Amino acid sequence: MTMPPLLIDDLTGYENFVFLETIKTDTDNFKSFLFLEPVNVLQTSRIDEVDTVLKEIERCVDKGFYAAGYVAYEAGYAFEPKLKNLMQKRNPSCPLIWFGIFKNPSICDVRYGDSGKLRHSAGTGELSYKINDINFIMDEDEYKDRIKQITKYNNSGDTYQINFT
């Protein structure tokens, strides 16, 4: 599912917005969210400001705002001193972090195919989520063995990040 032309046309007047689209729908996941008119935009292209911006985003969320945006892969260099020098090769015109801070999103119920018809959310009740029925696909010993191997790769310098999913 992509944003319908009507919705795209409606967004042309907005400088900053975030559309979080739900495409894998089921009985619990059927809402897409459109964040418009941020009360603030928090961003940086500087590696030395990454931690400060992340903390400010967290403060805003703690105050009841919504944060929607992105963190670039390279922002991770801020947390590994050995990698900070790689930032010299990065295009500084693209932010490492960009987040809009919003009061409430507009919500689209994609079960009905009316993704162009959004309604405003007045509160957090509609935005609740739950995590349930978590099952692991391996036993604890196998998990520990794999984590030890990943740690070995990281410590030897073969890699600095592995997504173990």
Image (cartoon, helix red, strand yellow):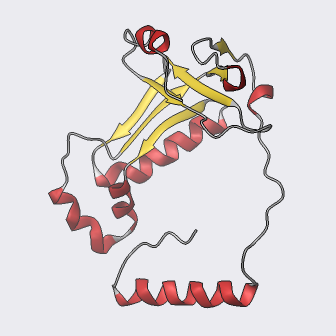
The answer to which of 147 and 92 lies nearer the viewer is 147
In the image, 17: left or right of 85? right
Quadrant of the rendered image containing residue 127: top right
Q: Residue at x 58, y 35 (%)?
A: 60
In the image, 90: left or right of 29? left
The answer to which of 165 and 4 lies nearer the viewer is 4
* Residue 24 on image: x %, y %: 64, 40
Please state, as top left, top right, bottom left or bottom right, where the N terminus lies in the image: top right
**133 lies above or below 139:** above
* Residue 117 on image: x %, y %: 62, 11
Q: Residue at x 61, y 21 (%)?
A: 103
Counting labels gives 0
* Residue 41 on image: x %, y %: 42, 29
In the image, 78: left or right of 5? left
Please state, as top left, top right, bottom left or bottom right, where the C terminus lies in the image: bottom right
**92 lies above or below 143:** above
The answer to which of 77 and 63 lies nearer the viewer is 77
Quadrant of the rendered image containing residue 107: top right
Q: Residue at x 21, y 65 (%)?
A: 86
Name the residue at the left extreme: 89
* Residue 90 on image: x %, y %: 19, 53
In the image, 160: left or right of 64? left
Q: Residue at x 80, y 27 (%)?
A: 125
